[in-house]
Image (tube, coloured by chain):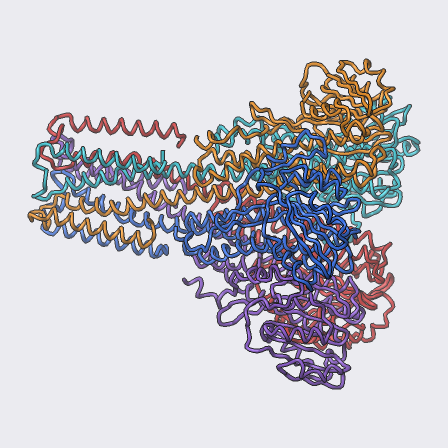
Chain colours: A orange, B cyan, C red, D blue, E purple
Amino acid sequence: MKGKKRLRRKLPGRPLKREMQSLTRTIGQPPGTLLHIGEQKTGSALITVFGYDEAHEFHCTVNSLSECMAWKEWPGVLWINIDGLHDVTLIEEAGRLYNIHPLTQEDILHTGQRPKIEDFEGYLFLVLRTLEVDPASAEITEEQLSMVIGKNYVLTFQEKPGDMFQAVRERIKSPGTGIRKRRADYLAYALIDAVVDSYFLILEELESHIELLDQELFAASGHDTFQSIYGLKKELILLRKSVRPMREIINSISRDHYKVIDDAATWPFFRDVYDNVILIIETIETYRDIVIGMYDTWLAIVNNRMNEIMKVLTTIATIFMPLSFMAGVYGMNFRSMPGLEWQWGFYALLGVMGLIVAGMLVFFRTRKWF
Amino acid sequence: MKGKKRLRRKLPGRPLKREMQSLTRTIGQPPGTLLHIGEQKTGSALITVFGYDEAHEFHCTVNSLSECMAWKEWPGVLWINIDGLHDVTLIEEAGRLYNIHPLTQEDILHTGQRPKIEDFEGYLFLVLRTLEVDPASAEITEEQLSMVIGKNYVLTFQEKPGDMFQAVRERIKSPGTGIRKRRADYLAYALIDAVVDSYFLILEELESHIELLDQELFAASGHDTFQSIYGLKKELILLRKSVRPMREIINSISRDHYKVIDDAATWPFFRDVYDNVILIIETIETYRDIVIGMYDTWLAIVNNRMNEIMKVLTTIATIFMPLSFMAGVYGMNFRSMPGLEWQWGFYALLGVMGLIVAGMLVFFRTRKWF
Amino acid sequence: MKGKKRLRRKLPGRPLKREMQSLTRTIGQPPGTLLHIGEQKTGSALITVFGYDEAHEFHCTVNSLSECMAWKEWPGVLWINIDGLHDVTLIEEAGRLYNIHPLTQEDILHTGQRPKIEDFEGYLFLVLRTLEVDPASAEITEEQLSMVIGKNYVLTFQEKPGDMFQAVRERIKSPGTGIRKRRADYLAYALIDAVVDSYFLILEELESHIELLDQELFAASGHDTFQSIYGLKKELILLRKSVRPMREIINSISRDHYKVIDDAATWPFFRDVYDNVILIIETIETYRDIVIGMYDTWLAIVNNRMNEIMKVLTTIATIFMPLSFMAGVYGMNFRSMPGLEWQWGFYALLGVMGLIVAGMLVFFRTRKWF
Amino acid sequence: MKGKKRLRRKLPGRPLKREMQSLTRTIGQPPGTLLHIGEQKTGSALITVFGYDEAHEFHCTVNSLSECMAWKEWPGVLWINIDGLHDVTLIEEAGRLYNIHPLTQEDILHTGQRPKIEDFEGYLFLVLRTLEVDPASAEITEEQLSMVIGKNYVLTFQEKPGDMFQAVRERIKSPGTGIRKRRADYLAYALIDAVVDSYFLILEELESHIELLDQELFAASGHDTFQSIYGLKKELILLRKSVRPMREIINSISRDHYKVIDDAATWPFFRDVYDNVILIIETIETYRDIVIGMYDTWLAIVNNRMNEIMKVLTTIATIFMPLSFMAGVYGMNFRSMPGLEWQWGFYALLGVMGLIVAGMLVFFRTRKWF
Amino acid sequence: MKGKKRLRRKLPGRPLKREMQSLTRTIGQPPGTLLHIGEQKTGSALITVFGYDEAHEFHCTVNSLSECMAWKEWPGVLWINIDGLHDVTLIEEAGRLYNIHPLTQEDILHTGQRPKIEDFEGYLFLVLRTLEVDPASAEITEEQLSMVIGKNYVLTFQEKPGDMFQAVRERIKSPGTGIRKRRADYLAYALIDAVVDSYFLILEELESHIELLDQELFAASGHDTFQSIYGLKKELILLRKSVRPMREIINSISRDHYKVIDDAATWPFFRDVYDNVILIIETIETYRDIVIGMYDTWLAIVNNRMNEIMKVLTTIATIFMPLSFMAGVYGMNFRSMPGLEWQWGFYALLGVMGLIVAGMLVFFRTRKWF
């Protein structure tokens, strides 16, 4: 009980479910069938458009992509973010406007994809997983973020609005920031960086629980402690599954020389993201090893405690069983028993019992039971 | 008992058997000997023929390959599916018609093969494993699907009819679908995709069990729980064995530039299958880690429960053994014992006993036993 | 007891011994020293000679290699099999006749080698491990099979005669079989294939034990069960050690283009062996994972059973200790005790005891002890 | 208690904390934002400047980089060490002077980086982790050491002053040492070598604890022992995380031919560091395996001890329960019981009891309980 | 007790110590500082010189290298073996004579190196680890063997004399042996081969213990058994650490075409050593897996035995507690109790008790407790 109370906040975690369930719903459909997979998570789709170059910037929020028709002519960088995927026609429209392959459109809608990078004619397609903790319920929501990177535009697709990209939006709005001076590939970097930063937030949450567990492990090893260990282990496994493919994605950006990425200018920034991804993966592995060590320790402590309890039981039984037997012997009703009539018989027997107890205690001491 | 009842359906699983047994039956035979390995699983072989191009389509079901002689001249795509392998002459006939190497014919009949891809003069030979759950018995049947991919035909061989390819058949029958516009390599892709989709169905079944176990783990940790954990672990191991070689097969399709596969047009689709295979493999690994964590947790809970039981036992013994001893002492028949004649002796002794119990309870409280 | 009886036959296994012991006997000898390592396993060396081409075939069994001098001129394929290595001069003679390097001769005699492939001037040298189960004792014998593959001959060396190659001999004797139409490299393939087939036989034996264990695990988890698990684990470890190097050997045949192997014609057959080796290795790994899962399960069952036993003990002790104490109290000899004189005192006390038992049972029921 | 006392000194360790916490503080900042991450660990920044060539040497300690302006013209090797990173302007100033990329400046200040090597225009940037044990508290402090290696200068940045580089300073001060004859790359080597040497010191500390644990394991396996095992395991995991990236860094120096490193002259020295890093990594792995073995052993010993305790309890209970029962039987108040009136009844019963005890002891002996 | 006695000899092992301690003694020294690390293990350094070619041979033992000046002109193969490294001037002298790099000299003296191979101008430098078992104490001594291989000489450096190279010396002395006909690279091979052979001796020792443990595991699973398992595991870990780098060293000899090694002539011999090293490494891995399986088995046996003990205890308690209670009830002093006055009351009660015992036994039988 106490163990739990002392933890600052609830261990973040996510329910184990629905991933496959949603993927199996498309079985039997021809490839390229547009069908949104997953629950509808937001009321109506929300489209946020940002256009900027070094000198100018505009942004607005619309409900239908046709309203943003005019912006297609914008010569600077364009970022269109679509929150809400249940409106399939919206995706189809975006697909027509930006010449997006049907398979890409399908991947945008099937939100159970593994993070990946795919090169298509005219654009680069990325699938990432974003992670957010709901501070109230401590539940982790994992979403798919699809990103289409063109020569001068970036399209992002999410199931529901999140505030992960707030800082990027602020930087776009402020004139003179680095992002205003650069191209769409830098915008893509900034967004990917924001996604990777969100992993740090999850890790920090888990870290604070690991730290507390580490301190409390030898003090209070109740049921709660173990439930925390199990939860941490599970969460680290799921986290690793989401983060690990990122390594290969960013590696591919550096290795495969995609047309829409300007290697010389933007690679130092991607290398920075890469370092962060490696740091996250190694930290997850390190924490897993530590949490496994905690489990072993918990088990050892429980075993040790059992040992202590058994020692108490055995000590008590070993002392009182012979004594009770002796009392039982002198409680028998035989007519002729030695000592019963003797005046000091009772005290003599108590003395013998005292000697036996002393002997037992010496025996236990030599066995180091206390 | 209850743990099991709450699971929506029986854990799908398969008996551990017969794999090697069937393979050893051919030992000593020269290579290329045609001999069907495995039980006969269907009455008489069933041959389903589909022929189509963009404009036309025909299909029918025959019992003997000679009836489909006429179709050999069909210029479009031809798909011949043979269910039932016990009729060895049928395979020989197909071998003659399509110029199939004796070793390939042997592999089609020896249904215990590891999934593989082999390039032969004029065709590509694939061995896949299909998995189907019988909804009634929850038993998983693993079958070998052999596929011969030629320039304009696909031959598939199975031991017994399944409904895995139903959706593909529907798409072929509907004019205007993508499959009608493409060649045999796309048909091969569609069939492989259907096989991979069937793995998702198994995974979904297992996932729903893992989810339930995860919720119930700390509540009901009886024998059933553990049996489920063991079953899940075993099934994930067997599943991994079936799925893992798929990775290398599809990798090989992309890497080795087989003549019968039109790389440019069909590769994006195979890449899609590849992503699915990777997702399945990683999900299996993740689930294995989680199920191993569940086993550890189960053991820890049982240990903890043992601890609780021991505490109860020790508390009871530690309280009543000294009391019983004292009662025994005053039940002895010594003539001269102090207090027996005293009017309040009985109550005084009860008081002393009460003090001892109180002391014990304080002792246990300091040891945090309750 | 019963667990064991139900297993169809004894678990095949081999004693853990003598491997290093024999290798250390040659320490200090200059390389190329011919000294047979290992016990003498057969009376006198037995030489079997097979010569054949498509039209002719002859074979005979001699005791000295000089008797087979005449056959050296045979233009077709020649297979000389030598059983029994204690006669060092025999090996030396063969070495002279076929120009075998002293290090190869040494390796033939030192029968504790790891499977390997080595290319020498004029021949290819292979070391394989054969495995045979003695059906009576269920003991697995592991032997070294050395193979020298020349342009038109194959020499095989074993410590004692085995019947592994019986099927190959039959095929050579029958005119018209594939082996008669091909060259020495195909003969080598046929022999290697026979060796790999022998692994399947071992695996099938182990598989039938694993299957039985899997069925019985939750029913009868006695000492025998565990001994079987331990034996299976050990045997799978040793099996893996023997089989794993085979992968690399056959890989090398395909990759390194040895002069004595006709790649185009024989490689499809070696690829077949390769598939089998991979299947065996993966099956061993899968079985190991399953057997490890069985061990965990066994431990969990034992723990669970201990829990049950402890519950019985605790229930009994918790019920009878307070009752015995109360009986003890009313067995004391105080002059003045309440209720002793009361007519219904005895029955009242029994009633109180009954209430206590009922309370205990309710307590245990809430803790779900039955 | 005793177990701990016998350990020469406290197990060195570090608290599990704050790593991620500090990294998440920069989330949302544009790249290149200079903001010191981590606590301020020293009063005011301290700058130590060393300049030398074979003939001359000077050094001094200043508080502001502008005071060292004059030294920029120094033609020999220049080493500027800055302790204390909270003064962001200092880093900016150094950045301007030596043309350091904003991302490098950011990395210098964000002190939670993974060790890495990055090639920039004109200099090589290294991030290392230094480890120091505070002898009093036995706490390990892990710091980030950033190193900028130019053609003839080395800049090092640390959060607080340490005495790791004392020996290097001494060697610079002494005329005629190797370091005076060589260039800046050799100085970089000497500093990296000093960092790697500091890992040896930690390892030696851990080694002495492992050695003691190994000796005491079977003698005193109390709670302390286990806490030491847990601490060692955790520390080895964290140590590995710090050291492992070093391997790849030094590998990169040898492989990537950086401009500022003179391969021919300095590589033999880096190879030496590389050998040390490999030795450290392998030693960590070996110790981890040994410590894991110790954990298993500890658990086994506790289990064994429990067994011993249970044997004592069972022996006592098995002997005295039947005896007490017999005494209880002859304490019953039935009017008619056989033997009560017999003169030798009491002794006869004691005799029977003696026989029972003897029988029990024989029974336990056959079960090898003592 | 008995378990240990039956082992033929003491388990060979080595104390866990001093490795790092000695390496940290050089921290702060400039590279190339000559300082002997480790204890002085022999009285005064002993130099053994062997010179030979096919026709001639001479050898002698001196105390100072200057005495062997004359031999420098020897045109054949020269082998100088130096036992004892505490005399630093000796190493310096050898260094001058044979032009040995200061870093090599340092590595010779710092005897805690990892096995490695380094190519220097004019010679090849190898560090190997030799292992010897002291038959009396069963303690394994691990020494560093440094080897400098020149065009026509081999220098070897050891801390104390060993008899590992006795067989090589004998072969050099005998005219006509292979070693006399070959060059210095063959001598180097012969020495490395002798080192690898010494690993076989250790493995054989360990093997005999594993074999015995395997036989005794199910019979006698006392404390000794476990201590042996722990010792074996530790020794296998340390052994692997010493042997594993050998693989890479010999691989490097074949791959890197060192000038002092005549590839064509000597490589077949090195390949032989390579096969042995691989065999040793795989055997170590196999033994580790087996020993881990033994640990699990030991734990399972202990658990099982605990189960047996608990069954005895529970059976006894469950039988005698109700009986004692009944006896206690009829020992109470109530005036009015039914049956006390009845003539057959005592026997009736005994009968009831008998029935209870019978019922209990049936209950235990159904639970399969015996």
Q: Decide which of A364, E6 is in the foreground and name it.
A: A364
* Left or right for B241, reference C335: right
* Left or right for D120, reference E366: right
Residue E42 appears anywhere in the view: yes
Q: What is the quadrant of residue C151 in the picture?
A: bottom right
Q: What is the quadrant of residue D29 in the picture?
A: top right
Q: Decide which of E31, E294 is in the foreground and name it.
A: E31
* Left or right for D88, reference A328: right
Q: Where is residue E286 shown, x and y percent of the image?
A: 60, 57
Residue E334 vertical position relative to residue E227 in the rendered view, above or below: above
Q: Where is residue B241 shown, x and y percent of the image?
A: 67, 42
Q: Residue at x 10, y 38 (%)?
A: B339
Residue B14 vertical position relative to residue E99 in the rendered view, above or below: above
Residue C127 vertical position relative to residue A216 in the rendered view, above or below: below
Residue C144 appears anywhere in the view: no
Q: Where is residue D203 shown, x and y percent of the image?
A: 56, 54
**Number of marks present in the image shown:** 0
Q: Decide which of D219, C345 is in the foreground and name it.
A: D219
